[in-house]
Image (cartoon, coloured by chain):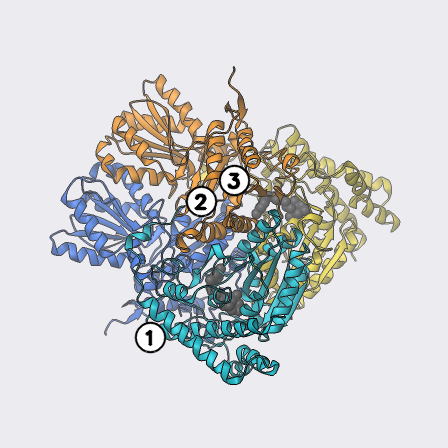
Chain colours: A cyan, B yellow, C blue, D orange
Amino acid sequence: MQNDGKRVELLRQMLLSRHFDEKVNDLYAEGKVHGTAHFYVGQESVAVGAIAALKEGDVITSTHRGHGHAIAFGLDVDRMAAELLGQATGYCHGKGGSMHIADVGAGMLGANGIVGGSMGIACGAAWAFKRRGQDNAAICFFGEGATNEGIFHETLNMAAIWKLPVVFLCENNQYGMSMSVKKATAIENISDRASAYGMPGVTVAGSTLDEVYNATREALERARAGEGPTLMEAITYRYLGHSKSDANLYRTREEIATWRKQDPIQRFATVLEGEGVLERDEWRKLDEETRLRIEEAFEKASREPDPQPESALEDVYA
Amino acid sequence: MQNDGKRVELLRQMLLSRHFDEKVNDLYAEGKVHGTAHFYVGQESVAVGAIAALKEGDVITSTHRGHGHAIAFGLDVDRMAAELLGQATGYCHGKGGSMHIADVGAGMLGANGIVGGSMGIACGAAWAFKRRGQDNAAICFFGEGATNEGIFHETLNMAAIWKLPVVFLCENNQYGMSMSVKKATAIENISDRASAYGMPGVTVAGSTLDEVYNATREALERARAGEGPTLMEAITYRYLGHSKSDANLYRTREEIATWRKQDPIQRFATVLEGEGVLERDEWRKLDEETRLRIEEAFEKASREPDPQPESALEDVYA
Amino acid sequence: MPEREITYREAVREAMVGAMRENDEVFLMGEDVGVYGGAFGVSRGMIEEFGEERVVDTPISEAGYVGLCTGAALMGMRPIAEIQFSDFMTHCMDQLVNQAAKIRYMFGGEGRVPMVVRTPGGAGTGAAAQHSQSLEAWFVHTPGLKVVMPSTPYDAKGLLLSAIDDPNTVIFYEHKLLYNKKGTVPEEPYRVPLGEANVSRIGDDVTIVTAGLMHHYVLEAAEALADAGVEAEVVDLRTLSPMDDAAVRRSIEKTGKLVVVEEDVKTAGWGAEVVSRIVEGESFYSLDRAPARVAGADVPIPYNRDLEAHVRPTPEKVVEAVRNLVDARKGVYA
Amino acid sequence: MPEREITYREAVREAMVGAMRENDEVFLMGEDVGVYGGAFGVSRGMIEEFGEERVVDTPISEAGYVGLCTGAALMGMRPIAEIQFSDFMTHCMDQLVNQAAKIRYMFGGEGRVPMVVRTPGGAGTGAAAQHSQSLEAWFVHTPGLKVVMPSTPYDAKGLLLSAIDDPNTVIFYEHKLLYNKKGTVPEEPYRVPLGEANVSRIGDDVTIVTAGLMHHYVLEAAEALADAGVEAEVVDLRTLSPMDDAAVRRSIEKTGKLVVVEEDVKTAGWGAEVVSRIVEGESFYSLDRAPARVAGADVPIPYNRDLEAHVRPTPEKVVEAVRNLVDARKGVYA
Ligand SMILES: Cc1ncc(C[n+]2csc(CCOP(=O)(O)OP(=O)(O)O)c2C)c(N)n1
Ligand SMILES: Cc1ncc(C[n+]2csc(CCOP(=O)(O)OP(=O)(O)O)c2C)c(N)n1
Ligand SMILES: [Mg+2]
Ligand SMILES: [Mg+2]
């Protein structure tokens, strides 16, 4: 388990992630961001807990719902904000937007607008680690909806037969857009699918950061030891709509309220309080501090330069 | 179980299938057929045993290795032979060849040159049965290699959640082309994959016709009762190369010899002998009779007319 | 009686609802088409009328459900599959190209696949590279498929009804930026035949061939051109495959000038086929100028609004291309 | 010293072997590429030298392993993926088009995917509709991908080495009917640059643009035409994307006549792009005849040998098209 300073940092990351997405949500409502975005609010403990178990040189792949992964991986919220506003200083210099934020050099191999789209990429990174004899691993994040795409099946099978150092981390937030996991599959747990590939499957309470952290650490150890991949399922929930345009017709207010009660941030803060790592007013302060950090990021980003129109014709080929 | 006459008929179908493919193999060797073909020799008990459990109005989908399924389904060897020779009187009027033999009206929804290519089609037929309230079912044949394609995953999941009347019949003949199932997957049995969809999985000895028949009958009963699909795995083996051009470098002579010892036709004939249904010389006679029937089919086919060249431009649209 | 105006979205829905009332074998299948009403709200309200057996929410399995619809169609049903964004057609290419498009031919004419695949294409929504593509040229290049791309609510309804009737697989392209567009649409069912272009504006000076959203950009450009004394004849193809090049040819004989306006990336887009069909025939000799294409730039669609506008065709770019063509021999749009 | 002749198959292999000896980061991955040596024997013997870690047999999971190669390339490796028949590219369209082709652009230039996807295309083997397609136009229509289609053993080796060096994703089309074709190939490594056409025959009367197997049909036709007094200039594009239309343009200025010969189906094939690039520019005014395309018929490939021949381009059809073009204004090949 992490030391106290690290644990406070994890809380800070969750708060940063929460405030980032709440801010973006507001900006959409005000018509100040265009395109679309998908909010991670409610799921923060998964990205933060899992990524905390990584070490230098490890990589992640993300999804359409990628802000939280990026922040947990340490990406700069200034450059993320700039990207969302389409600025030249954004991670993708304004070409990618919310669904394509990446920092390949750092090991964040990209959000992805295609459901299941990054599963091959994660395996390829793991392949490179293995071939190069590096002691590194990849975490591949995806939603439970993605586990019904063919690519899920193909990549898990290959990772298993070649014992690739990758952790498949399914964030089961109960819905793929409007489709309930109960209707989309006829199984109890998504992690049950692991047995189809001969790899271990494990389900954890996604709202409990420590559970996510511990399970990921174990899976990463297995991966680094050459024992191959693990299918991890973190049970979680998204509070907000699927994307900016979602009338939430497929679920009830009560359901959302119930999940909000087991909020991952609250929960972790309470744990830290119990451990005597952090006092209540300290985390209130942290909350405010991170909120302001995000305000500042978007404020700053709004003053960044637009890309040159002609740059639209560049970067197609290397 | 079937009555005596039916059982002799099943033996006859297996023999017809064996002779058909051995004949085609010879014709290739002599350069008398072009394109490619995949031989079912050694697997006959699977198609014949499974299809024996069907009833009027049921359908099947087949694969690149489809001659045996077609014959077991009752397709006319004359028109099959004609198709292989590219004649106008063939099932596809010379346009399809070995990999596309079909008789949609009869319920044989086609061989398929794409690995996994017919799995969606089988589900669609099952969907139609269900929607129309028909008491029918589909058998979807495919090889163990096909179970690593994404479409396998997607269609099994959909069939499970919607309880479609379909039996997924995996013919595990140990190889997908040169790729051993042991290397291509990290699991014991292909039928273990059923649990990823919440459907039953069952593995049977494919060389034993009665086992195949019984398991299929059960699966079909389940399907017709609205209880949904089953993943059946029949352990089997192909004696000949993957296709006409295969140097068999990936397996040993001994392995082939071992499997030939448990030949499904021999085995079933011996059972019939034991049951007193058939005497040894009767099955020798049947063997010869079916061999001649195939000779005759190809002889006849060779005298059939070629299609008109202009017909190549027809049938793109209905 | 005043003519009824409804949106393009409603027109598409009306066609589906009409067909489903008429024929129990028609059903709609896709991601979030049920209570959610589809990502663009096209099927909103349909599950209430037809139930979840006929308005079917699928898992995220594009290949799987398009394959299933192919099989159902082969059995004589009339499936309508919805692909949430046309960019995801990449997932069901095998089902569409190797199965649905070829089954009839491979089986020697003994079988048919009367399926419709509806999908919204196009850019302009800030959704970036994986949610903004116009990939219809792939399907135009696939024998056995038909490709439809209506530009108005009227055509959307009439063409979709024809597509559902058609015994072949039809790829039906909608456009996100058209869904809210209103137009006159009769309440009763009617068919607009597949494969027939619509000459939506008469003019003597130049022929502009287009389809889908671009049709509106072209009409806008045509007005601006008219102000400058150039009368454009506008041919809305409506169906890209089979392509009504005869209609284009007739117009060219009059105008002697051809501009194609397409949203997809220029290189190997369907506009190249329009140009080629015209120039490789007699019409070549009717052209008094080099033909021109106004198309998407050969890049993925960028996120930033200005960058996106920079790479897309616009009415202004159409005007410029036409003026270059008309004004001077050498001013060909490049 | 006599010039060494090897087959196209051996040339492809030699490029792979050379690159793998030079650079440990290069590997080959695909179905049956190991002991089987690939469906067409291209990688035969390679697993013996490089082991199964670098010559990797995959499960039948085209999307999966092309996705894996995409990721490995993003990490700086140099994967070569083999798709057993180009018809199965339908399975990995998402990985190629939505991921590999766009990653660099979507990431604002911060990332690259130096992957090669080798695949045999084309008909003529009696393998029917699902094993005979020429789908390269789809990739020509995809910004971010390069598309190569060598016609000779020399080009196959030199272009493949360039493709492996290239920092972008390259789709490398081989042809089943070329594998046994022999030609002079230097033993040492050399590069043929991507994007440069080869004028393989000089002539004044007509320009014939082609690539791949069709190049040989065209050369055969050119000989027959020469006997009849028509001297064709032959432009072998070699790379379809980026397309060297400048080379075509230069030739047209001399000959004034254009015939494109492509194996893929005519409608919306890459030949339409060649024609369009020529006619929408200044070259339009250099043409003294309507250009013509000789292409595959707009049908799937049928099984029967005669039917197959009927729908494919042949040297005879090329001769006929050129003669129609040269002889008379109205005899345009339709
Ligand atoms: C291939 C593909 N199909 C469909 C979509 C549209 N889509 C975007 S997100 C989404 C739901 C994804 O569900 P899940 O994987 O559970 O992730 P979550 O949104 O819950 O985080 C859908 C259907 C897409 N982007 N890509
Ligand atoms: C999508 C696709 N990939 C690859 C192939 C080439 N291929 C044809 S059969 C085959 C092996 C199939 O193995 P399996 O499913 O076990 O069937 P079997 O041949 O053993 O009957 C392969 C790789 C194909 N036809 N389609
Ligand atoms: Mg989800
Ligand atoms: Mg097999």
Q: CA distance from mark 3 to mark 2?
A: 17 Å
**Chain on which label 2 sits:** D
- Is residue C188 something that shows in the picture? no
Q: Nearer the viewer, mark 3 or mark 1?
A: 1
Q: Secondary structure at mark 1?
A: loop
Residue neighbourhood size for the residue with mark 3, other residues' Cα within 10 Å, grouped as few (<14), some (14–19), many (≥20): many
Where is residue B100 drawn, in percent x and y? Answer: 57, 44
Residue that label 3 marks:
D119
Residue neighbourhood size for the residue with mark 2, other residues' Cα within 10 Å, grouped as few (<14), some (14–19), many (≥20): many
Q: Kindly check if marks 3 and 1 are in contact, taking CB atoms under 8 A apart as contact.
A: no
Quote the CA–CA distance across marks 1 and 2.
Answer: 40 Å
Is B262 displayed left or right of B38 in the figure? right
Per the rendering, the mark at residue A30 is: 1
The chain identifier of the residue carrying mark 3 reads D
How dense is the environment of label 1, judged by Cα within 10 Å: few (below 14), some, or many (20 and up)?
few
Residue D136 is left or right of residue B34, and the answer is left
- Give the mark nearest the N terminus, 3 or 2: 3
Disc 2 beta carbon < 8 A from ligand 1? Answer: no
Using the image as rendered, state which of residue D248 and residue B226 is in the foreground.
D248
Residue D88, given in percent of the width and then of the height, sits at: 53, 45
